[in-house]
Structure formats: structure tokens, C-alpha cells
Image (tube, helix red, strand yellow):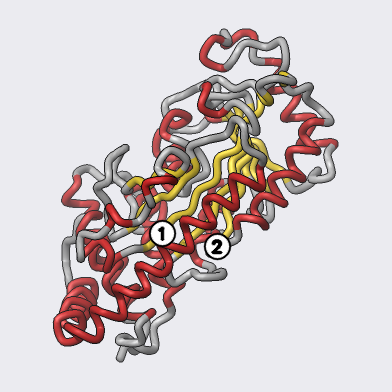
Amino acid sequence: MFEEVLQQSGFWASTGPFSHIVLSSRVRLARNMAAVPFPGRLPSDELSPVRDAIEAFASDSDFRGRVTIIDLKHVDSSEKRFLRERNIITYEMEGSENSLVALDGTDDFAILVNEEDHFRIQVIRPGLQMSEAYRIADRVDTELNRFVAFAFSEELGYLTACVSNLGTGMRVSALLHLPVTTMKNRVHELIPDDKKTMIDIKGTIGQSSKTLGGIYQLSSRVSLGLSEIDIIETLDEVLGRILDLEDNVRDEYLSDSRLELEDRIWRSLGMLQYSRRISYIEAMDHLSNVRLGIILAIIKNFDVKVVNDLMVRVQWAHLQRHYGLLFKSTNECDEYRADYIRKIMHSFEVK
């Protein structure tokens, strides 16, 4: 199963609308079984109702024959990390032995089982495709409801383990590449004051605004009192503002300091082409610069999808699986990362 997942290119290696900035769109629906304690209070010997429901979904729903269930209890730590690096499972699930994940064989969706909620339907699409992601998630939700009586209140909507998810149970988010906004220290301008209670932006390091490679996650904060369409439209409105800002600062940088920008991009390309040891943080920063260079046509004859793919495959567990070994140290991983990147870079005649 893991070899099949490894071979899949995934959403990150594809492109979609506005993919020069929006790497991916995600819709997540939180659902729980009625009359069954939330996962945090559910003893391991009472998991059978949840397991039975997801197994029935896999075997008898409209998606039968396409869904594979992975029981994380039978997965070692390296394989769990591999799944987490692919955004298939969460950090919480990586440390759990009571969680499962149901994967659609065509890479359309995943259902996270016994994370914070009994079920979390997750759909990720390349580029800005929030409505398409919601369409898929809604279809999966309808099918899952055939096998599960969801916990629901006429007053509060879908009941969830965290009160912030009450209502629709939906969270939407977009993964954004904002290298020049980051360089110019203008991240604080991204969300207008009147939307800060509804929309949040975070970097890729923990829960802070710190980021790797100028990549951020923009996500909805409110689920109660809004419809699914309202949530999507609010995020889309803020996304429009962010797209305009990043496009404008890219144009300004090219116009005012083109040589400085080109020097930054070409130096990064050289580091990736010739380094013998490179950390994940350093690799992400240089890949971010090269991605920007490709999009601005400063670097030619190089496919941006290759850079997107590298941003995922240079992570620890991916490299271990690619080379068929377990790293003994961070330095060893850094050496194999540099080797992997060099081979990819030298397979293209970059100009």
C-alpha cells in the first residue's frame, strides 16, 4: 500500500487555477457518531462502532473498490511520518494507535478516523479549487451518512469535539506561496481587520507566523452561524486580496530591483545543483526562490511541478523510503537530500 502511495504524484505535483500562488485548496468536514463518546473519551475496547462504520463505507458505498483503510496501529513510526508528510494524517494521528485513515484510490479524498472527531472528511485539490473540493467532500459526506447516524443538533448543527467546529463542521483552507510578500515583510497586510475574526493565516512552523519557503496556510475560523457557501465565499474574498498583493509586490520587485531578484534566484539554483549537504529548511528556502524564478520566467526549461514535488519529497521519511534506509543522523539525511535534489536538477537543461 505504501509503495503505491509513494508512486502517486499527489495534488502538489499538479497545477490548478492561480497555482502561481495557491498551491492547494482543502475542505475538511468534521462528523461524529450519535450516542458514541468523542475519540478522546472513547476507550480502545469500544472502538468497534466507528471501525464497523468506516469498513461498511469502504465496502458498500458508491466508492467501494476505490477505498483502502490503513489501521495506524499496524503502521511503524517511519510509515506514519511518511503519511503525515503527505498531509494524509495529522500530527495527532501520528502518535495514536486508535486512528485509521480511509484513502480513496484515485487520490480524491481521505477520511481521518478517530482523530479529534470520529470522522474528518478531507479533500485537497491543486490550485484554487475550493468549490470543487467542497463538491467532492459533500458527496463523500452524503455517502458516509448512509452508514453513520451523525451527531446533530437543530440549534447548534453538527456536534464536534471542539466547539470551534460546531455548526457546519467545515473548515476550508488554502496553501499559499508568498515569497515576495515575505521578503518585503508585508504579511501583516494580508487579512483586513474586519475579517480577522473569520480568517486566519499561519506559517508552516508550528502555530506561529514563521514560515518555510514563504509558504502559509490561510484558513477559516468560524463554522457556527454560517452556511458552507458563506464560509467559502469569505475565504475567496480574502484570497482575492492576497493574490493582488503578491502579484503587485512581485511586479514592483522586478521593476525596481530586477538584478537583486535574479541574483537571489540564480544563487538558490546553484545551491540546489551543487550542494553536498543541505538541511530541510535551507532546501525549502532555495526551492521557494527557484519556484518564483520559474513563474517569473527568469529560469526557463524547468517545470514548476517538479519544484512542487521536491518540496514534499525532500522530507525525512520520503527520503528514507526512496533510498530504502533509516537515517542515523540529521547530517546523513542532509547528505541524501542534497544527492536527491542534485540528480533531479541535473536532469533538466536549465537556462
Q: Is residue 70 visible?
A: no
Position of 216 compared to 227: left or right? left
For mark 2, what is the residue?
128
Vertical order, 65 against 149 (above or below): below
Comparing 232 with 310, the one in front is 232
Whether 350 is drawn above or below 200: the answer is below
**62 sits left or right of 29 in the view:** right
Rate crowding at label 1 as few (under 14), some (14 to 19) or many (20 or more) other CA atoms within 10 Å: many
Residue at the spot 38% in from the left edge and 52% down from the top edge: 191
Q: Characterize the local packing of mark 2: few (<14), some (14-19) or many (20 or more) Cα atoms within 10 angstroms.
A: many
Amino acid at circle 2:
Leu
- Residue tagged 1: 176
Left or right relative to 277: residue 311: right
Q: What is the count of numbered marks?
A: 2
Determine the secondary structure under disc 2: loop
Tag 1–tag 2 contact (CB < 8 Å)? no
